[in-house]
Image: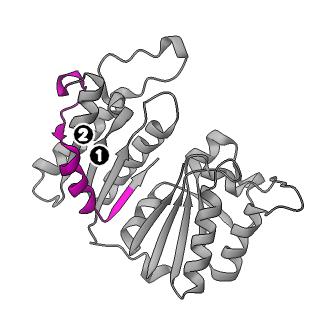
């Protein structure tokens, strides 16, 4: 099966990377971010979604000194750059979206201004419809 | 139909690996294909040959290996996640290989459906 099966040249799918966990209590945020960045090389459509405590991953002003962990929040800037490339490069026929769930923000008293990158805020029904449109949904 | 599988948790602590294995086995028995299973996050621990479960309990590492050997399923442990958790060539179980996250994305692109088993 192998060779023809993995002949993916020119195939474009819609991937959603779903982030539900806070950045430092578990490793899911960091390792999911690594997956997002690797995926950029494959020129696929991508939605990077933040819901529940996942919204904390992109909050401004993170300071991990007291817990001795690497502050990786700046790396989300690279995700934003990939999204901008997707928007601006006419040769890249893909769409990248960075979305946050409205209800998750409201429950936590947050707004889009609290984040280090630009996001679209979607209500949970809209996000649910968007999730249904995806070919692949990856989550940690 | 061909299925890609992502396993997010290690053996025993969570049921994810059991569920993924049983799904893969059932899919193959029904005539579907499971070309690759990718092990990420703590899922890399499914590839540890040093795992020694109790003798009257299932041996998940070996069960996965059987799928590889009997059905040609490509079992891929993520190199970076593996390094963090001490899964390297020297303790990698038979039937497993180590490679990069690109193989997960490639699997998502190639498979009809990609299924994630986690916590």
Residue A59 part of the magenta-drawn span: no
**What is the span of residues highlighted in magenta in the rendered image?**
A111-137
**Label 1 Cα crowd, 10 Å radius (few <14 / some 14-19 / many 20+):** many
**Label 2 Cα crowd, 10 Å radius (few <14 / some 14-19 / many 20+):** many
Residue located 40% across and 41% down the image:
A33
B87 over B30 or under it: above or below: above
A1 over B17 or under it: above or below: below
Residue located 69% across and 48% down the image:
B87
Estimate the x, y position of residue B70 in percent, counting from the top left.
Answer: 70, 82
Question: In the image as oriented, which residue stretches furthest toward the top?
Answer: A66
- Please, which chain is the residue tagged with disc 2 on? A
Q: Quadrant of residue A62?
A: top left
Question: Is residue A59 left or right of B6 when viewed as pictured?
Answer: left
Residue A116 part of the magenta-drawn span: yes
Q: Quadrant of residue B16?
A: bottom right
Instruction: Answer whether residue A44 is visible to the viewer in this image.
Output: no
Question: Is residue B98 left or right of A135 when viewed as pictured?
Answer: right
Question: In the image as oriented, which residue stretches furthest toward the right?
Answer: B55
* Front residue of this view, candidates B38 and A3: B38
* Front residue of this view, candidates B21 and B66: B21
The residue to which callout 2 is attached is A101
* Front residue of this view, candidates B118 and B39: B118
Residue located 23% across and 42% down the image:
A98
Number of the label disc, if any, that sits on residue A48: 1
Instruction: For marks 1 and 2, give the CA distance.
Output: 11 Å
| Among the two numbered marks 1 and 2 on one chain, the one whose residue lies closer to the N terminus | 1
Estimate the x, y position of residue B85 in percent, counting from the top left.
Answer: 66, 41
Is disc 1 placed on a helix, strand or loop?
strand
Estimate the x, y position of residue B9 in percent, counting from the top left.
Answer: 60, 50
């Amino acid at each position: 099966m192998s060779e023809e099966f993995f002949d993916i040249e020119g195939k474009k799918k819609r991937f959603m990377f779903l982030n539900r966990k806070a950045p430092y209590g578990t490793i899911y945020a960091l390792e999911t971010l690594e997956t997002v960045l690797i995926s950029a090389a494959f020129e696929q459509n991508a939605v990077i979604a933040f819901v529940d405590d996942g919204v904390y991953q992109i909050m401004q002003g993170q300071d991990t000194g007291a817990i001795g962990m690497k502050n990786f929040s700046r790396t989300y800037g690279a995700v934003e750059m990939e999204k901008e490339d997707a928007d601006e490069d006419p040769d890249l026929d893909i769409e990248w979206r960075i979305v946050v769930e409205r209800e998750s923000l409201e429950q936590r008293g947050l707004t889009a201004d609290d984040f280090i990158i630009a996001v679209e805020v979607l209500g949970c029904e809209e996000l649910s419809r968007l999730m249904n449109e995806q070919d692949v949904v990856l989550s940690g | 139909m061909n299925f890609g599988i992502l396993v997010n948790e290690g053996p025993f602590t969570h049921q994810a690996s059991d569920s993924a294995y049983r799904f893969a086995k059932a899919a193959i028995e029904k005539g579907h294909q499971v070309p690759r299973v990718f092990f990420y996050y703590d899922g890399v621990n499914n590839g540890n040959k040093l795992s020694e479960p109790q003798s009257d309990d299932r041996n998940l590492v070996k069960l996965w290996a059987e799928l590889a050997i009997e059905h040609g399923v490509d079992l891929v442990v993520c190199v970076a996640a593996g390094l963090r958790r001490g899964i390297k060539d020297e303790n990698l179980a038979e039937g497993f290989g180590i490679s990069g996250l690109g193989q997960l994305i490639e699997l998502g692109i190639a498979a009809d459906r990609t299924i994630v088993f986690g916590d």
